Each structure stands twice: as structure tokens, then as C-alpha cells.
Image (cartoon, rainbow, N blue to C red):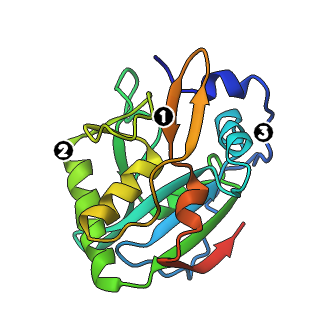
Amino acid sequence: MRSWWILLTLLCLPCCQRQVPRSILPADAEMRPGDIVFRRGGSMASNAVLLADRSGHYSHVGIVVDSCGVMMVVHAVPGEPEYEGAPDRVKMERPERFFSSLNACEGEICRAHDSIAARRAASAALAVYRRGVLFDHDYDSNDTTKLYCTQLVIESYRKAGVELTGPPTHTYDLALLQCTCWLPSDIYLSQDIYSVRAFE
């Protein structure tokens, strides 16, 4: 069973496009381990997420980790394999690439009030990446052997002792998918985090 957005994307058009790829991340943007990064994409898939997430502004989310002293973003995303033919899995990349105009037209950095828990969450997310966990195309919130983007962040913080949000409440009963899942706004509206910087 494939992702629910395959059906929804047929109804959507891109909201933004950049002819010359660049990073929308400001050069002086500061990131810390455990920061939660949001982006709004211009692809049909991103617009499908926004169509489903009526109360949200962003279509994708990741978590910042410290990889040997370098800030990186760990996130779970479909359609961006490491190489042709590779399965979709949790990936790690530089923030500048995460916020490439190929994938983002707006972005925001949010930070947990509890800095110790944030570091623990970052460590948990880095461990998920190192295990090569696959992307969950079924969006099964009860299955942590595979993860989708919001689930990755929520589970990482849960392992650090922070419940960013309650149980998933967004239910879809479509021909290609039946699930109840979390969407980016569920994390963005959490009382445990605050905005550090928004940009476009």
C-alpha cells in the first residue's frame, strides 16, 4: 500500500518554485541538537500534506542532530532515496540541503524549552538514522519499525521523556491508505517548543 498523498497530489499544484536552486536557510541561522525544523515545500506531495493539514503551515519536519561536531538534519521523507533504486529510509543531510529551494520555499527553526531533553531526542534520532530505518508508507503510528516524518520527531522526543503531542487524530480512509497519523501542525503547536526563527 502506497502513501496517501499519491491520490491527493492529483488535486494539487505546486505553491512555489525556484528556477536556480539555492538554500533558503539564512547564513547566520543558529541550530542546536534537538531543534525541530519545519519546511513548506512547493511539490505536489507537499501541497497534498497541506491540503490534509488544514491547521498547518508546513509540509515536512525534521530534527537537528550533532554528527561529529557538525549540525545535521535527520528526517524521514518519501521520494528522496540516497541513490536510484534505494528504498525510502530515514536520512541525514546538511541543513542547507534540507532547506534547498528544490524542496522548500519557507522554513522555521523551533526549539524545546528543555535543552537536556532536546539533546537526548537528537541522540535518539541519530540512532534511528544509523540503524537505517525505512520510511513508513502506511503511516502506521503504532509501528515504530518504520517511521514517517512527524512520527520520527515525536518518537525521538518521547524517548527523551517529552510528549510533544497527544495520540494521532488525523484519520484517512482512502483507496490507497487507511490510517490515523500525526501531521506537522501537531508538533508545531506543541507547548514544549518555541519558534527561534522563520524565513523564506
Residue 131 shows which numbered tag? 2
Say which amino acid is labelled 1.
Answer: Pro
Distance from label 1 to label 3 (Cα)? 17 Å
Q: Which one is earlier in the sequence, the residue at label 2 or at label 3?
A: 3
Which residue occupies the foreground of this view, 159 or 105? 159
Q: Which one is earlier in the sequence, the residue at label 2 or at label 1?
A: 1
* Residue ID for mark 3: 14
Residue 78 shows which numbered tag? 1
Say which amino acid is labelled 3.
Answer: Pro
Q: Is residue 10 left or right of residue 95?
A: right
Q: Is residue 48 left or right of residue 71?
A: right
Distance from label 2 to label 1 (Cα)? 17 Å
**In contact (CB < 8 Å): disc 2 and disc 1:** no
Q: Is residue 161 left or right of residue 152?
A: left
Which residue occupies the foreground of this view, 6 or 102? 6
Q: Which residue lies at the image location 79% right of the left edge and 26% below the top edge?
A: 11
Q: Secondary structure at mark 3?
A: loop
Q: Position of residue 21 (x, y in %)?
A: 66, 50
Distance from label 2 to label 3 (Cα)? 33 Å
**In contact (CB < 8 Å): disc 2 and disc 3:** no
Q: Which residue lies at the image location 47% right of the left edge and 77% below the top edge?
A: 192
Residue 49 placement: quadrant: top right
Q: Which one is earlier in the sequence, the residue at label 1 or at label 3?
A: 3
Say which amino acid is labelled 2.
Answer: Arg
Q: Position of residue 126 (x, y in %)?
A: 25, 58
Residue 23 placement: quadrant: bottom right
Res. 171 visible in picture:
yes
Residue 40 placement: quadrant: bottom right
